[in-house]
Image (cartoon, rainbow, N blue to C red):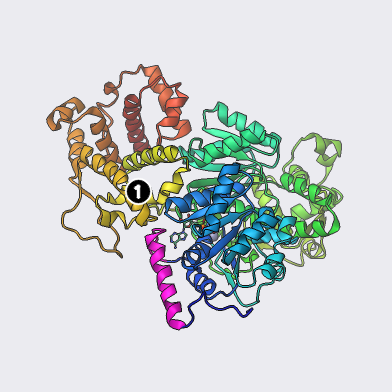
Amino acid sequence: MQGKSLPRATGIEKHNDMINRARSLLKSVFGYDRFISLQEEIIENVLRKNDALVIMPTGGGKSLCYQIPALIFPGLTVVVSPLISLMKDQVDQLTTAGVAAALLNSSLSPEEYDHNVESVKRGRVKLLYLAPETLLKANIIRLLSSVNVDCFAIDEAHCISSWGHDFRPEYRQLSDLRNRFPEAVCIALTATATSRVREDIKTSLGMDTSGEFIASFNRENLYIRVIPKKDPVNQTVDFMKNFLNQSGIIYCFTRRQVDDLYAYLHRLGYSVKPYHAGLAETERHRNQEMFIRDDVQIIVATIAFGMGIDKENIRFILHYDLPQNIESYYQEIGRAGRDGLRSDCLLLFSYGDLQKIKYLINKKDDHEKRVASIHLNALLGFAETDDCRRIPLINYFGENYTREHCKMCDNCLAGKKAVQDITVASQKFLSCVKRTGEIFGANHIIDVLRGSKSQKVIKFGHQRLSTYSIGMEHSRRQWVQLSRQFISKGLLSQDAEFGGLKLTEKAWAVLKGNQTVKGRIEEDHPPVPRPELEELNHDHGLFEALRKKRKELADAAGVPPYVIFSDKALVQMAAHYPQDQTSFMLIHGVGNVKLEKYGHIFMEVIRRYCRENEIVLLQGEVPDKKVSIPTAQTNLRHIVIGEAFNSGRSVPDIMQEYKIKLDTVLNHLYRYLHENHSLKPEGLLSLSSLTEDEQKDAFNAFDRLGPEYLGPVFRELNRRVCYEDLRILRLYYLIRMNRNT
Ligand code: ADP
Ligand code: ZN
């Protein structure tokens, strides 16, 4: 503690007042019902003017920890952030919620810059965002000295440490701040920090040792999966079938890889853009902007992408290549699902990629090499584990994660394979390693065991060894998994540079038959498990209508869509159909200003949709905060229509009787099917004007792209088949599919 006092007012009463203010600002400005994670404790501390080091995963809710105090402090809060684009987004978000925020950096025109300086001088700004190099300019220091600065928030604080993965020298100079502004409280925030980095941050910023807040790193909404990389292009396309029309990032190791994969996906008709340091600044910027604004769905990028974006509705992160280390990996997947909705993270793992990274690490100097190897090994432990993926991942960040079953990773969902005796397999493998001279990697050993006639086998004459083709009982895939177990059980050591395998002491005991080995043999083609979608059951048609409106408003205001409302907010609207202010206010992220600005516009969309689709709300139900919003009850028209159709009535008949359009009938039938009723297929195809060949093309497109979204299918068929026809065919397709499963 450095003798700081509460801002002006002292005493417990005043302090309690401030806490209560914080709680009410949470809803009235930001639109949230309760604090999450450690936000409340942190805010309380900052308000008491105790320094705080905050360690929370990406998407954990760090911003509020200084944004709320900033609204309560009488003076200014300065936020130091390394990325210009991120600053702009945050300022946009705050301004949209009615908060006086501004930024000063090189992206502003001289007029804007002067205007912002003037606003700060006049005390009109509560939050000022600055880049570290801007902050330390003489004129800015003068500006800040002339006003009352209550708080410095240092975002991405790990950049201050050379033990972090993203050291930035200009952050070092921030230590100066404490001397110049001793009255201001300091809150440092980061998503990745080992204990070493933490110490570095605290000493560099001269923070007192007390206030360290480490939130849980477990991001429960991320489904984490690692699979062996075999046919990466097709694995990618397969994976993406689950995310039509949704946002995602694919990370590659090299620019070249980005360009190739981008070109391929682009040819297939995906809405995709590349991003890497080799592109012109303007193009890079444009691509990022399109992604943020939902104008393009997928970005193929090198690791250079994502640091500066706050986009909330990223639904998947695919690591096409191995990331550099576990910290970057966690930060990269952390970009998914900031809105709290389920998101998928898939890593394609190969030992070849591992060698590439090791090669790069070996070129570094000694200190860097050590740091990088520690980080890389942690990543390897994560990729190779049979246990819950969250154990190595979360424990790496210093948290003691012990839960056995997270339900949201591949290993947990696959269930534990029974442990069995794998002594014989071990002996075969180990003796093959021995006989080939202890210089080859697992792939070659497996080739020999499985009797391959590869050039390499022939060249070394390994087809003449006694261990040649003695391992046909296991598939290649099973052997690969076995070999990993041999390494992790300490029977084999692996050359760090070339990947060659060597026997250990322990291996000899096994070879001599003095020791048995227990382990797991994977099934050859395990079904890909998918966790239950815990997402709120919502009306997809309404969601699309809301999304369209949001996009329109965002474009008009020149901001990314999520600045207006998050996907989570739209999902809630599409589940609960709020049509008055009280119930609209219960939606995630709706505060006073947004209610006033956007409430009526979105409620109008909801009302219109309900009218057109004959959805009526339960009458007289009072919204209850805890139970949340009254769920809409429809008049069950889709059931009536579904049953009529099943009983043999024709669609034109139904249209006439109920006085509804073909589209509406199709919607009802779709919904009927969606709720797990079965439908008969007869009488559907005749509604379509397509030839049999055209129909076949469409079905093939559904096979490839999935039936969830029609947009990609429409594009795939060169925009020649109208949406009405597509709806008919999709319905038929789904009925047929349901029957086959
Ligand atoms: P970080 O900076 O830690 O990556 P953010 O501050 O951007 O995380 O917050 C991530 C998301 O969490 C935000 O988009 C916001 O919607 C949500 N969020 C933050 N605090 C709360 C809260 N108290 N209740 C509900 N959602 C919250
Ligand atoms: Zn798990």
Magenta region: 12-34
Q: Quadrant of the N terminus?
A: bottom right
Q: Quadrant of the C terminus?
A: top left
487 vs 114: above or below: below
Queried whether the magenta region covers residue 546, the answer comes back as no
Queried whether the magenta region covers residue 24, the answer comes back as yes
Q: Which residue is mark 1?
A: 597
286 sits left or right of 646 in the view: right
- Mark 1: give few (<14), some (14-19) or many (20+) Cα within 10 Å: some
30 sits left or right of 208 in the view: left
Residue 169 visible in the shown view: yes
- Name the residue: 38% across, 38% down: 548
| Percent coordinates x, y for residue 585 in the rendering | 31, 56
The amino acid on which the numbered mark 1 sits, given as a three-letter code, is Lys
What element does badge 1 sit on? helix
Q: Quadrant of residue 673?
A: top left
503 sits left or right of 569 in the view: right
| Percent coordinates x, y for residue 119 in the rendering | 52, 54
Q: Quadrant of residue 144?
A: bottom right
| Percent coordinates x, y for residue 595 in the rendering | 33, 52
102 vs 232: above or below: below
Q: Quadrant of residue 325?
A: bottom right
Q: Find the residue positioned furthest to the bottom.
A: 11
Q: Nearer the viewer, residue 507 or 677?
A: 677
| Percent coordinates x, y for residue 409 in the rendering | 53, 56
Q: Nearer the viewer, residue 466 or 718?
A: 718
204 sits left or right of 699 in the view: right
Residue 677 visible in the shown view: no
- SS majority, magenta: helix
